[in-house]
Image (cartoon, rainbow, N blue to C red):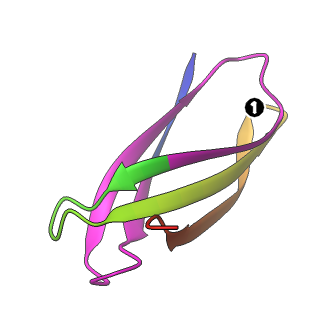
Amino acid sequence: MKTFNETISCYSCYSTFELSIEVDLEFNGWNSEIYDCTICCNPNKIDYEVADHELVSLIIENGND
């Protein structure tokens, strides 16, 4: 497993919080996960892309859809 630690801004309240994304070493491609904001508790949909063991894209959207 590889862990990417990122600081993001909440889609709802714009507060920043830390998240850890764990991916298998063999994983390449796109994935989506829901992370609740540690400040306002609203869900954030995190779309991310991993290529060659690196996080190459991170998109934060409303997780209430």
Percent from the top left, x then y, of residue 41? 20, 62
In magenta stretch: residue 65: no
Main secondary structure of the magenta stretch: strand
Residue drawn at x 45%, y 54% as measured from the top left: 6
Position above or below: 24 against 47: above
Query: Is residue 42 left or right of 48 when viewed as pictured?
Result: left
- What range of the chain is rendered magenta? 6-33
Percent from the top left, x then y, of residue 9? 38, 74
Residue drawn at x 46%, y 50% as measured from the top left: 34
Percent from the top left, x then y, of residue 33? 53, 45
- Which residue bears the numbered disc 1? 53
Residue drawn at x 28%, y 66% as measured from the top left: 42
Residue that sits furthest to the left in the current view: 39
Position above or below: 10 against 46: below
Kind of residue at badge 1: His
Query: Is residue 47 left or right of 35 when viewed as pictured?
Result: right
Q: Nearer the viewer, residue 35 or 56?
A: 35
Query: Is residue 36 left or right of 7 when viewed as pictured?
Result: left
Secondary element under disc 1, as helix, strand or loop, is loop
